[in-house]
Amino acid sequence: MEKLGKILAIGIPLLILAYIFFQNFLISHDYNYFYDIGSENDNYLSPNSRISDKIIEDDSNYRNLTEGLVYFEVPILKGSNYININARFKDNFPEYGRLRIGASDQEVWHYKYNLIFDESLFPNTNGQWLIGETVYNIKQDNLTIQNGKLSLLFNIPHLSPDANTTNTQYIPIDWINITVHKDGWIW
Protein backbone atom coordinates (compact mmCIF):
# COMPACT_ATOMS: atom_id res chain seq x y z
CA MET A 1 0.00 0.00 0.00
CA GLU A 2 2.85 2.36 0.86
CA LYS A 3 4.53 1.55 -2.46
CA LEU A 4 1.31 2.31 -4.36
CA GLY A 5 1.05 5.67 -2.57
CA LYS A 6 4.60 6.61 -3.62
CA ILE A 7 3.95 5.58 -7.23
CA LEU A 8 0.79 7.70 -7.31
CA ALA A 9 2.52 10.66 -5.60
CA ILE A 10 5.23 10.66 -8.25
CA GLY A 11 3.24 9.32 -11.20
CA ILE A 12 0.33 11.78 -11.14
CA PRO A 13 2.49 14.95 -11.26
CA LEU A 14 4.63 13.37 -14.00
CA LEU A 15 1.50 12.58 -16.03
CA ILE A 16 0.23 16.14 -15.57
CA LEU A 17 3.59 17.59 -16.68
CA ALA A 18 3.72 15.23 -19.66
CA TYR A 19 0.19 16.26 -20.67
CA ILE A 20 1.02 19.97 -20.40
CA PHE A 21 4.21 19.48 -22.42
CA PHE A 22 2.36 17.46 -25.06
CA GLN A 23 -0.47 20.00 -25.39
CA ASN A 24 1.77 23.06 -25.53
CA PHE A 25 4.74 21.86 -27.55
CA LEU A 26 4.15 18.66 -29.48
CA ILE A 27 0.78 19.02 -31.19
CA SER A 28 -0.55 21.71 -33.54
CA HIS A 29 -3.25 24.14 -32.41
CA ASP A 30 -5.67 26.44 -34.20
CA TYR A 31 -6.96 29.45 -32.29
CA ASN A 32 -10.12 31.04 -33.63
CA TYR A 33 -11.26 34.64 -33.07
CA PHE A 34 -14.67 35.68 -34.37
CA TYR A 35 -15.35 39.42 -34.41
CA ASP A 36 -19.08 40.03 -34.85
CA ILE A 37 -19.13 43.61 -36.11
CA GLY A 38 -22.31 45.37 -35.03
CA SER A 39 -23.01 42.99 -32.15
CA GLU A 40 -23.89 44.15 -28.65
CA ASN A 41 -20.29 44.15 -27.34
CA ASP A 42 -18.59 45.14 -30.59
CA ASN A 43 -15.45 47.21 -30.04
CA TYR A 44 -13.04 45.59 -32.49
CA LEU A 45 -12.53 48.31 -35.10
CA SER A 46 -10.81 51.66 -34.66
CA PRO A 47 -10.73 54.58 -34.80
CA ASN A 48 -14.41 55.17 -34.11
CA SER A 49 -14.42 58.22 -36.38
CA ARG A 50 -13.89 55.88 -39.40
CA ILE A 51 -16.80 53.54 -38.71
CA SER A 52 -20.55 54.12 -38.52
CA ASP A 53 -22.87 53.41 -35.64
CA LYS A 54 -24.32 49.89 -35.55
CA ILE A 55 -26.82 49.13 -38.28
CA ILE A 56 -29.47 46.57 -37.41
CA GLU A 57 -31.26 44.69 -40.20
CA ASP A 58 -33.30 41.50 -40.33
CA ASP A 59 -30.48 39.23 -41.52
CA SER A 60 -27.45 40.89 -39.87
CA ASN A 61 -26.06 43.66 -37.72
CA TYR A 62 -23.04 45.47 -39.13
CA ARG A 63 -21.13 48.72 -39.38
CA ASN A 64 -20.02 50.79 -42.34
CA LEU A 65 -16.36 51.54 -42.93
CA THR A 66 -16.39 55.24 -43.83
CA GLU A 67 -12.69 56.01 -44.41
CA GLY A 68 -9.79 54.31 -46.13
CA LEU A 69 -7.93 52.79 -43.15
CA VAL A 70 -9.68 50.96 -40.31
CA TYR A 71 -7.65 48.96 -37.76
CA PHE A 72 -8.17 45.85 -35.61
CA GLU A 73 -5.92 43.52 -33.62
CA VAL A 74 -5.66 39.80 -33.01
CA PRO A 75 -3.80 37.94 -30.23
CA ILE A 76 -0.86 35.89 -31.54
CA LEU A 77 0.88 33.27 -29.40
CA LYS A 78 4.64 33.01 -29.62
CA GLY A 79 5.62 30.40 -32.21
CA SER A 80 2.45 30.78 -34.30
CA ASN A 81 2.99 30.04 -37.99
CA TYR A 82 0.22 31.56 -40.04
CA ILE A 83 -2.97 33.55 -39.80
CA ASN A 84 -6.06 33.06 -41.96
CA ILE A 85 -8.44 36.03 -42.18
CA ASN A 86 -12.00 35.91 -43.56
CA ALA A 87 -14.24 38.97 -43.66
CA ARG A 88 -17.88 39.35 -44.71
CA PHE A 89 -18.55 42.64 -46.45
CA LYS A 90 -21.02 44.06 -48.94
CA ASP A 91 -20.02 44.96 -52.49
CA ASN A 92 -20.73 48.67 -52.34
CA PHE A 93 -17.60 49.49 -54.36
CA PRO A 94 -17.31 51.88 -57.27
CA GLU A 95 -15.94 50.60 -60.56
CA TYR A 96 -12.36 49.42 -60.04
CA GLY A 97 -12.81 49.56 -56.25
CA ARG A 98 -10.55 47.41 -54.06
CA LEU A 99 -10.40 46.10 -50.52
CA ARG A 100 -7.12 44.98 -49.01
CA ILE A 101 -6.20 43.64 -45.60
CA GLY A 102 -2.86 44.72 -44.22
CA ALA A 103 -0.77 43.07 -41.50
CA SER A 104 1.88 45.00 -39.59
CA ASP A 105 5.37 44.14 -40.84
CA GLN A 106 7.33 46.87 -39.05
CA GLU A 107 7.11 48.45 -35.63
CA VAL A 108 5.95 51.81 -36.99
CA TRP A 109 2.90 52.14 -39.25
CA HIS A 110 3.89 49.85 -42.09
CA TYR A 111 1.74 47.03 -43.44
CA LYS A 112 2.00 44.15 -45.91
CA TYR A 113 -1.19 44.17 -48.00
CA ASN A 114 -3.16 41.31 -49.50
CA LEU A 115 -6.06 41.96 -51.87
CA ILE A 116 -9.41 40.42 -50.87
CA PHE A 117 -11.73 42.27 -53.26
CA ASP A 118 -11.67 43.70 -56.75
CA GLU A 119 -13.93 43.15 -59.75
CA SER A 120 -11.81 40.29 -61.10
CA LEU A 121 -12.21 38.29 -57.87
CA PHE A 122 -15.99 38.84 -57.60
CA PRO A 123 -17.50 39.78 -60.99
CA ASN A 124 -21.13 40.97 -61.11
CA THR A 125 -21.72 41.05 -57.35
CA ASN A 126 -22.81 44.65 -56.84
CA GLY A 127 -24.81 44.99 -53.61
CA GLN A 128 -24.28 41.39 -52.44
CA TRP A 129 -22.68 40.20 -49.21
CA LEU A 130 -19.34 38.54 -49.97
CA ILE A 131 -16.64 36.72 -48.03
CA GLY A 132 -13.04 37.65 -48.79
CA GLU A 133 -10.09 35.63 -47.52
CA THR A 134 -6.36 36.02 -47.15
CA VAL A 135 -3.53 34.15 -45.43
CA TYR A 136 -0.29 35.46 -43.97
CA ASN A 137 2.73 33.36 -43.06
CA ILE A 138 3.92 35.10 -39.89
CA LYS A 139 7.62 34.27 -40.33
CA GLN A 140 7.95 34.47 -44.12
CA ASP A 141 5.99 37.73 -44.30
CA ASN A 142 8.09 39.13 -41.41
CA LEU A 143 5.01 40.22 -39.49
CA THR A 144 5.58 42.30 -36.37
CA ILE A 145 3.91 41.08 -33.18
CA GLN A 146 3.84 43.69 -30.41
CA ASN A 147 2.67 42.91 -26.87
CA GLY A 148 1.30 39.57 -28.08
CA LYS A 149 -0.93 41.17 -30.76
CA LEU A 150 -0.79 41.64 -34.50
CA SER A 151 -2.14 44.90 -35.88
CA LEU A 152 -4.31 44.46 -38.98
CA LEU A 153 -6.23 46.93 -41.11
CA PHE A 154 -8.78 47.29 -43.86
CA ASN A 155 -7.48 49.44 -46.70
CA ILE A 156 -10.14 50.86 -49.02
CA PRO A 157 -8.37 53.31 -51.35
CA HIS A 158 -11.49 55.00 -52.74
CA LEU A 159 -12.50 56.05 -49.21
CA SER A 160 -9.16 57.74 -48.47
CA PRO A 161 -9.34 61.50 -47.94
CA ASP A 162 -6.98 62.06 -50.88
CA ALA A 163 -9.03 59.96 -53.34
CA ASN A 164 -10.00 62.01 -56.39
CA THR A 165 -13.58 60.81 -56.73
CA THR A 166 -15.76 58.21 -55.12
CA ASN A 167 -19.06 56.60 -56.01
CA THR A 168 -19.83 55.48 -52.47
CA GLN A 169 -19.10 56.78 -49.00
CA TYR A 170 -18.99 53.50 -47.11
CA ILE A 171 -18.37 49.73 -47.21
CA PRO A 172 -20.56 47.57 -44.90
CA ILE A 173 -18.74 44.90 -42.85
CA ASP A 174 -20.57 42.16 -40.94
CA TRP A 175 -17.88 40.00 -39.34
CA ILE A 176 -14.20 39.03 -39.29
CA ASN A 177 -13.17 35.42 -38.63
CA ILE A 178 -9.50 34.83 -37.82
CA THR A 179 -7.69 31.52 -37.34
CA VAL A 180 -4.16 31.53 -35.95
CA HIS A 181 -2.24 28.28 -36.51
CA LYS A 182 0.64 27.12 -34.33
CA ASP A 183 2.58 24.01 -35.39
CA GLY A 184 3.76 21.49 -32.85
CA TRP A 185 7.30 20.17 -32.80
CA ILE A 186 6.37 16.74 -34.13
CA TRP A 187 3.99 17.77 -36.88
Image (tube, helix red, strand yellow):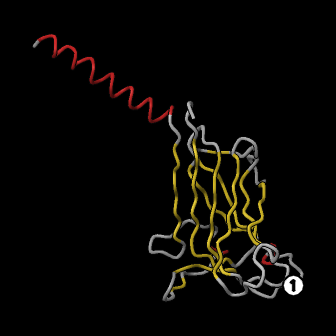
Residue 9 located left or right of residue 107: left
Residue 93, image x, y percentages: 76, 82
Residue at horizontal 56 percent and vertical 31 percent from the top: 186
Mark 1 belongs to which amino acid? Answer: Thr
Does 113 appear above or below 23?
A: below
The residue at 38%/31% (across/down) is 19
The image quarter containing residue 127 is: bottom right
The quarter of the picture where the C terminus appears is top right
Q: Quadrant of the N terminus?
A: top left
In the rendered structure, the answer to whether residue 164 lies left or right of residue 11 reads right
Q: Nearer the viewer, residue 39 or 107?
A: 39
Q: Which residue is mark 1?
A: 165
Frontmost residue, 86 versus 121 = 121
Disc 1 packing (10 Å; few <14; some 14–19; many ≥20): few
The residue lying toward the viewer, choosing from 180 and 170, is 180
- Residue 138 location in percent, x, y? 69, 45
